[in-house]
Amino acid sequence: MKEDNVFELSTEKVNQNTLGIDTASTGEILHMMNEEDQKVAEAVRLVIPQIEEVVDKVVTSISQGGRLIYMGAGTSGRLGVLDAVECPPTFSVDSDVVVGLIAGGEKAFVKAVEGAEDDEGLGVSDLKEFGLTPLDTVVGIAASGRTPYVIGGLKYAREVGATAVALSCNTGSKISAEAELAIEVDAGPEALTGSTRLKAGTAQKMVLNMISTASMIKLGKAYGNLMVDVNISNYKLEQRAIGIIESITGADKETAAATLKKANNEVKPSIVMITLGCGYEEAKNRLEDANGYVRLAIEK
């Protein structure tokens, strides 16, 4: 891959299947895009072994008091932030356990900050400001695989001794060379040449979903396929929590709701309390002994 020829990147190549997209009807445009999108899931499937390695690293990081830190620029950075901010309400983790850093800071989420992605030093300073430690896992995200902000961050992560992970949409990418682990999802050229918010963005979102969700499941945030660590911050989530308790314990809605209140709006101890007929404190102790795994707390 030559640095001076961007069109050698898979994400920048001209898609031969959509050459006539500008003269196509609305329906034809949408069908072209849909046909290209169908290639994304298969491209992600091919890199599941690499994603598995990353998940195991993330689980180790968080279980030892470390963090999962996403960093990227533009669309890639925004996708990392999106995944990070969904973790506290979904899994009741503190907001500093999964973090999204975007080149240019929070303001760059809604408006591009010119030149921020081209500064390797900015990637370093952002991680320094965040107090990076060897316990952390840093996932650098760049569709092109060559964003300087991400390269700088990954270099620094390795200096510190943190786990450095590269997520790109080109094979043999520059950020992969700076990482301990690399995930390269090549879904081919975009329907609209170079618009990496399309297939590349979808691929990145799918991989980030897999990393955070699989990690949280491995950390005991699920019972079966139910979210037993959901943070009850509004009426919808309260009703979801009650439904989860009903589904797992077989209790009626009134019992589930009443127990949830006794359990300080925590789903896990509510399940243990109903299943074992114990009080809140015993339920909490059992969960602590079981490292937060509901199944183990019930079966012990």
Image (cartoon, rainbow, N blue to C red):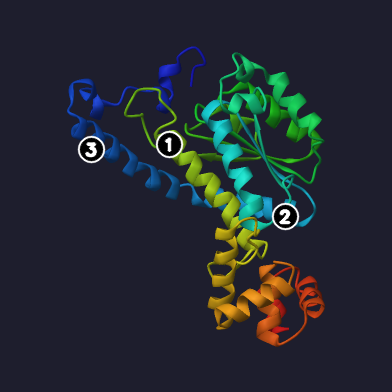
Q: For numbered disc 3, what is the local secondary structure?
A: helix
Q: Earlier in the sequence, mark 3 or mark 1?
A: 3
Label whose residue precedes the other's in the sequence (1 or 2): 2
Up-down relation of residue 89 to residue 200 (above or below)? below
The correct choice, above or below, for 150 with respect to 253 in the image is: above
At 32% across and 29% down in the image, what residue appears? 191
Q: Residues within 10 Å of mark 2 (few under 14, many from 20)?
A: some
- Measured from the top left, where is residue 54 in percent x and y? 62, 48
Local packing at callout 1 (Cα closer than 10 Å; few below 14, some 14-19, many 20+) is: many
Asked if the residues shown at circle 1 and circle 2 are in contact, with their CB atoms under 8 angstroms apart, the answer is no
What amino acid does circle 3 point to? His
Mark 1–mark 2 Cα distance, whole angstroms, equals 28 Å
Q: Residue placed at 68% from the left, 57% from the top? A: 92
Percent of width and height locating residue 80: 59, 38
Q: Secondary structure at mark 2?
A: helix
The amino acid type found where label 2 is placed reads Thr
Q: Quick check: can you spot residue 241?
A: yes
Label ID, residue 267: none
* Residue that label 1 marks: 186
Q: Residue furthest top?
A: 4
The quarter holding residue 183 reads top right
Give coordinates of residue 274: x percent, y percent.
67, 83
Q: Which mark is residue 60?
A: 2
- Identify the element where label 1 is drawn: loop
- On the question of residue 295 being in view, the answer is no
Tag shown at residue 31: 3
Image depth: mark 2 or mark 3 in front: 3
Work out whether residue 295 or residue 54 is closer to the camera in this orientation and state it: 295
**Left or right: residue 42 compared with residue 255:** left
